Image (cartoon, rainbow, N blue to C red):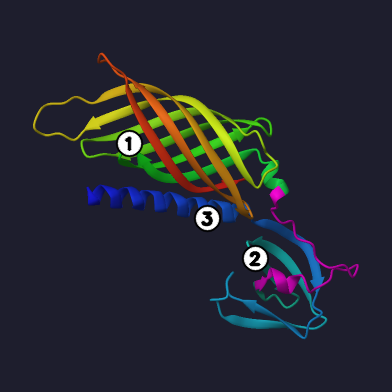
Amino acid sequence: MHYRKRRSLLSFTFLALCLWLFGASAFAQSLTGQKVKVLEPYLELRTGPGEGFPVFHTAETGEWLQLLYRKTTWVRVKDTRGHEGWASVDAIRKTVDANGQAVVFKEPRFEDFNSRRWELGALGGDFDGASVGSFYGGYWWTEYLSTEVGLSQILGNFSEIRMINADLVHQPFPTWRVSPFFALGAGSAFIRPKSTLVDVENRNEDSVHFGVGVRFYVSDRYFVRAEYKEYVVFTDRDQNEEAQEWKIGLSVFF
């Protein structure tokens, strides 16, 4: 059981890391063609986009730099002698363009969160006592209504379940930083029993569900999503089954 929980946690961590990297790349900006003049006594250039990379060159007052590419809070630049390196966004903000104006970067803001069209997320939690990890993608048709498709892996004591769901999501208060939402959907579960004592066949079962949740905008392109769902699973036995699920995770919009 502990192995299954670790496996589920590792899968969720991997999905969340991929999501963070995707959000960082989606935040990248091409800046080719913009030139700025250094006003400070010097501007440090590093070998990579981070404080952990060494400074290999400094541009002095009056030098011109060409802005090539932005990656999160760092900008790749090139000076007139051909040196290319990374400078912090804060340092570039202290330069000016050919018209003497400060450089303005487009930053993801809460207003962009309100007008988003696509979102992706990775969530983990509990499905009726079993560990669950999920990945979903959604498209907002209006600021109030979206459709989503999600994939989940559920690791229980007696079976391993892979589930695919389609949801219709309603967000009644799109301008709130902490915004509740409601979901209604259906899906299919592909169940593989783990019992080796008897010959148990794999089976597929359909389900419907209702859910409530909340989104909390964090910063840049990221927000936290938490949700609770109740499932009705249609079986070939005399009585259908019910299950409860709760999850929380990280999402990115673009």
Judge by depth and name the residue closer to the eye, 21 or 178: 178
Judge by depth and name the residue closer to the eye, 144 or 44: 144
The three-letter code of the residue at mark 3 reads Leu
Residue 86 is drawn in which quadrant? bottom right
Residue receiving disc 3: 21
Principal secondary structure, stretch drawn in magenta: loop
Q: Secondary structure at mark 1?
A: loop
**Which range of residues does the magenta coloring cover?**
86-110
Where is residue 209 shown, x and y percent of the image?
Answer: 44, 26
Number of numbered labels in the structure image? 3
Residue receiving disc 2: 73
Where is residue 249 shown, x and y percent of the image?
Answer: 48, 48
Q: On the rendered image, what quadrant is the C terminus found in?
A: top right
- Name the residue at the top extreme: 238
- Residue 7, relative to residue 53: is it above or below? above
Q: Is disc 3 in contact with disc 1, using a CB cutoff of under 8 Å?
A: no
Quick check: is 94 in the magenta stretch?
A: yes
Residue receiving disc 1: 128
